[in-house]
Image (cartoon, coloured by chain):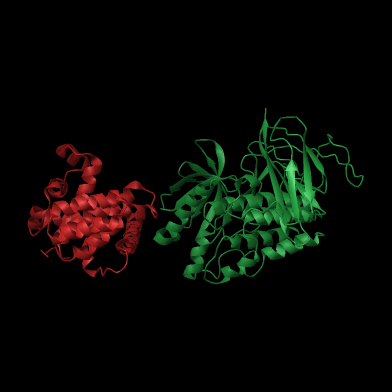
Chain colours: A red, B green
Amino acid sequence: MGMTRTDELVRALDAADVRAASRTADELVAAGAADEALDALAERAASSRAALELLVETLDASGVVHRFAGSMLLDRDAIDDVAQDTLISVVQSIASYRGGGRFTSWVHPIVRRRVADHLRRQRETTTLDEELLPAARMSSMIATRATVQQALADLPELYRLPVVLRDVHGLTYAQVAERTGRTLGTVKSQVSRGRAMVAGMLTDDGQPA
Amino acid sequence: MTTRVGHYLITESIGAGSFASVHRAIDERLDDTVAIKILAENHSMNPEIRERFIAEGRALRRVGGRGVPAVYDIGESDRQQPYLVLEHADRGSLRERVETLRAGGWVAQPHDLLALARPLAAGVAEVHRARLVHRDLSPGNLLLASHAAPTDQPSLGSHLVRDDERLLLADLGICKDLAVNSGLTVAGGTSGFRPPEQDAPGTVDTRADIWAISAVLSWVAEGAALPAALTRVLSRGRSTRPAQRQADARTWLREVEDALAPPEPAVDVPQAAPPRRRGLIAAIAAAVAIAAGFVFGIWVGGEPPTPSGVPGASISISGPEEISVGEHAVFTASVSGVESWSWSLPNHRFVADEAEVTITPTSPGTGEVVLRSRTDDGDDLEARRTVRVVD
């Protein structure tokens, strides 16, 4: 059953049918087969922007990053921050993913490194270090770089508004939630995914990829 | 100097290891004494060690029986150190207890060994049932705590593990495990109580704990005149090859009990059937007092049952299936083809070679009367009878 749905997902991706791919990925996650969906998406993510975006959504929706972070951290906000940093790191290093094993096995050490960064930052509490963390860096890049505008414009509608409100207009998550009529949790997740997707459209130094 | 961690006021350090330290503390909200185990500050920056530490708390919670310390909470200090808030073992460790007793000239008696072996096997069975291996059972990690409420288990009158005490298996060796894998220490476990397979990286299964509890019991029994049968049981438990050890804690305890049986009669007197055999006085009254969660109720299970008969020999029990509290109930053995047998009664007493036994339950519940024998050919026979006790 999992195999046939995964085949469907692959077919939809090959046919550039984003809606069908997204629906199938959702179904796989709901059926507890997130791993199969992630493996299929990750294999194509380096060469297909649609696959990369769907990978970000599916990885976040599967809860696996939160679960990994939650095995090392206890504070809910810390777990959220690390999960967001991880999504961005995953997108930025997806070109080095070689397949073969489970995608989530590739993600786990990334989570571990982001946890280590987070703990170090907490201890040092310098704003300079904070700038170096993926989420903070993407946030300021989105706010300041003209080259990001195109990436923002290319962001799926669902994510564009919360990211623009949060990072360009500098609203708090609570204000973004109020403005968009979405829940706080939804907005946090959408900003997190949106930033990761923008990261996927840029090179490391903020130029269009 | 006093320190606060969360709403816990640390009063005294009660132990330190290479990864974590343990402190006695006051829970200021609930006004109770607790133990706080906190990960060392330098290790708190290491995601992998944090993961193991947090996993230990979750594993203890999953075991959740009477044989491990209760986990009340998990938290994080403002120095990012994860900490576990645990039940405080107010009577110290088994090591301290034995050393104190020995200073007074004490040598273990069979009832002391039983008083230890029973909760030890029960705790190990709980840990194994949660699909965990403890890996570091040693006298310093076996703690004693006073009962919140007395149980209705029969009194053994031991000074080793007293009737009003619980034995707790502390410190699941998960962090130490990591130390082995990362080369931070030579080996997991405590020297002298560590099975040979833990000296090197490799597969460690539940039988590692069988080795360790055999070593603990041997250590406690040092200087005692042991029945040869017990020495054999404990040597088997410490076989180098795990496959030669007792398969599980249940088997281990049964062998220990058989080797030590029968313990001194405790308190009971009432009488029942007249003497039947060899003119011995068969005055056996036993209380069907099955404490919830006691060892026999929580076996890991999975062994093939022992037959009640083989060609040429059989045993069976006749007697009531349901009795009332305070009522004397008589169980009769029907045996053929065997010379000798033993009864195992619900209060964990053993009676050899009697045609009948009488039990007098003191509380409602379910108990089991077991009859065991062995043929000349060495086949084990076993018959069981479950008794419901109603008010």
Query: How many marks are shown on the rendered structure?
Result: 0
B374, B122: nearer the viewer: B374
Residue A119 at x, y = what percent?
Answer: 35, 57
Query: In the drawing, does residue B104 fall left or right of residue A194?
Result: right
Residue B218 to residue A190: above or below: below
Q: Pick the residue in front: A166 or A127.
A: A166
Whether residue A93 is visible here, answered yes or no, is no
Residue B347, position in %: x, y?
73, 42
The answer to whether any part of residue B370 appears in the image is yes
Q: Quadrant of the C terminus of chain B?
A: top right
Is A32 situated left or right of B388 in this image? left
Instruction: From the top left corner, tell me how far across and down residue B18 is, in percent.
Output: 53, 62
When the figure is inspected, residue B7 is found, relative to residue B49, above or below; the finding is above
Residue displayed at 73% across by 34% down: B361
Depth order, front residue of A144/B220: B220
Residue A99: image quadrant is: bottom left
For residue B376, which quarter of the picture?
A: bottom right
Which residue appears at 18% of the width and 56% of the height? A53
Between B134 and A34, the one lying in front of the other is A34
Residue A127: % across, % down: 26, 55
Q: Residue furthest top?
A: B391
Q: Quadrant of residue B227?
A: bottom right
| Residue most extreme to the front | B311
